[in-house]
Image (tube, helix red, strand yellow):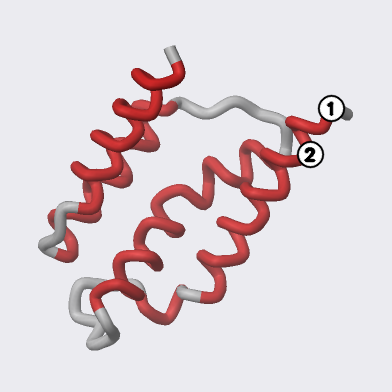
Amino acid sequence: MSEQINEAKMLALALYEIRILLSSYLGSENSGPIEVRTAAHLAYALHNEALAMLEGRSINVQDALDKVRAIDGILNVNVGADFAVSLANFNTKKA
């Protein structure tokens, strides 16, 4: 197994574990700090993609971004839009 695959799986497992740790902060009515609630929703939105990567399957990036963008409507934040812009900027810099 290549080093890159090991790194991706390590990060995917970390995201999956973060989702479990922050699960009590999910929901639009939760009274926790908005930063923690946002992190919980971000981890929850992407945990299936993390699991797919751990299993060696590919993911649909557009579908994943749609899940992240949905956080904006749930929590009245801009994390989804900001995440998409950051990803686009990162991809532009790498090209």
1 and 2 marks in contact (CB < 8 Å): yes
Residue 54: percent from left, percent from top: 70, 42
Quadrant of the snapshot with the N terminus = top right
Q: Which is nearer the eye, 93 or 82?
A: 93
State left or right for residue 17 relative to residue 37. Answer: right
Which numbered circle lies on residue 6? 2
Tell me which residue sits at (56%, 56%) in the image.
15
Above or below, comparing residue 19 to residue 45 in the picture: below
Which numbered circle lies on residue 84? none
Above or below, comparing residue 21 to residue 51 in the picture: below
Q: In the rendered structure, which amino acid carries the disc numbered 1?
A: Ser
- The residue at which mark 1 appears reads as 2
Q: Which is nearer the eye, 2 or 45?
A: 2
Seen from this angle, which residue lies furthest front? 93
Secondary structure category for the residue under label 2: helix
Per the model, the C-alpha gap separating discs 1 and 2 is: 6 Å
